[in-house]
Amino acid sequence: MIKWFSAAVWGLLAVVMGGAAVPVASAQSVRVEVADALQSVANGKKGRVVVFLIAPTAKIRPRADPIDGFFEENPQPIFGMDTANLSAGVELTPDTEGFLGEPGGHQVARGKLKDLPPGEYRLQAAWIASFGDVGSWEGTAGNLFSEPVKAQLAPGKQITLTLVNTTDDRAFPKDAVGAEEFAIRSDLLSKFYGRDITIRAGVRFPRNFRPGRKYPVVYEVPGFGGDHASAARPSRNPQARELEENAFHIVLDPSSPTGHSLFLDSDNNGPRGKALTEELIPALEAKFPLVTTKQGRLLRGHSSGGWSTLWLATEYPEVFGACWSSSPDPVDFRQFELVDIYGRDNHYTENGAETASARMGGNEPTMSVRQENTMEDVLSPGLTSAQQWTSWQACWGRRAENGGIRPLYDVVTGKLDKDEAESYRRFDITDRLRKDPKRFVPLFRNNVRLIVGTRDDYYLEKAVELLAADLENLDPKGEIPGGGYIKFVPMTTHSTVFGSAEIRGIPKEMTDYLAKAGLMGK
């Protein structure tokens, strides 16, 4: 396990660089105002003002704006405060608390605006009233944001940011060719939430579509932050041509108010798996000429989509024939990224060392678990940000007495709730395998194709290693026949694994599977 080690007392932000302490500004503030034309949007509504900054020394992706964060490769400062009256403007004072970011070193998380080193920053503000049903403030209408500006943070200086832009609801591209949006009201989810909930999919027709023919379908689950609109983009993979001529490609929308739903039946997100299998898929099959056997329903997903497809393939084997998963979210909670939630006492540290949550590029750690959780909490406190760690706790955790998400750990101290951790075993894929090998070993040997890089940016290969080891222990000679496999691609990351022969070979494997089932060219 790779860890980060403390190098300074973060509360003072006196990080030694080359023998000299980084100076801090004694007082500085940021005022956020709303443009006159947008006063009616925010009038009378509660919201949260968040200021995103990019530090002078930041090394982040080119042409990025501050609100494009979180920047996992180089975490940057974020400050926020709730407001009930935006029309009069809001001032973030020198004592406003937030996330200090990279200027203070890897161990730095919480601090005050006045603790930031002086210099020319890029700043951008947002007023967030809602994350909507999609779990994204950028994809929900009625939130506001400013243009990015460059300004000096210095003692006694005030910077003013004006909110001049408003967000719109996400929409499926109207000019999509060969693809269309499909949406229905979910009775199951509407009952859970007590209001109308719509579930969606993006449907891409086969190349050279022939009316009267029944087609198999590849159901794709996007990764975190993705949705069904990706179905509007035609594939540019020449190796997928035969598959695209002989199968529908349907992209499912995994969005929920708390982030990615993972398509499981959740205490916090409702019966997402049942809504998919009992409502959406039957409705799709009623409208489009789809094969209605499990052999004609394949699954493909990466990252959070990869976890979703593993769950669907093993939870609903009567619905889906096989899945191709890559770089899935943690499949074994003994390696919740790098944290053993069952065995550790603290989610952020072990033996005094900070635990990493990202190593962008697959090399040295670039962000700690404490930093990422602090950024989420500053964006929207109380497990309401719909970001990655919040999303996981919503999916796998229980409900709190106040109706919100029960935390797995204290967001400030990192102390783990051991009772809550035990409840996560319901969704621990490897734990389920160990407890019920008679059910799950055949499913993995027959239905699961799993690929991950050995230098995953989020250490996700660690959990897959435990899964592979337990599967081998339970079936050491591979006596259960089938086409399933677990493959580790050397020296590839969360993204570069897409360039591997293993990933590029998936379309051919799918066509071979469908041909064996007699579903090609019928």
Image (spheres, rainbow, N blue to C red):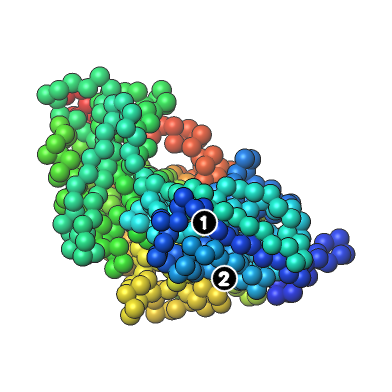
Kindly state the secondary structure of the residue where label 2 is placed.
loop
Q: Amino acid at mark 2?
A: Tyr
Q: Residue at x 74, y 55 (%)?
A: 152
Query: 10 Å neighbourhood of mark 1: few (<14), some, or many (≥20)?
Result: many
* Residue that label 2 marks: 348
Q: What is the number of the mark on residue 447?
A: none
Dividing the image into 4 quarters, which one contains the N terminus? bottom right
Image coordinates for residue 216, horizontal then vertical, percent: 21, 33
Q: Which residue is located at x 35 percent, y 53 percent?
A: 134
- In this rendered view, identify the residue nearer to me: 368 or 78: 78
Q: Position of residue 311 (x, y in %)?
A: 31, 54
User: Residue 200 in the image: x percent, y percent?
Assistant: 26, 45
What separation in Å lies between label 2 and label 1 (alpha carbons)?
37 Å
Q: Amino acid at mark 1?
A: Val
In the rendered image, the vertical position of residue 48 relative to residue 457, given as above or below: below
Label 2 crowding class (10 Å Cα cut-off): few <14, some 14-19, many 20+?
many
Circle 2 or circle 1, nearest the eye: 1
Q: Is residue 403 visible?
A: yes
Which is nearer the eye, 51 or 453?
51
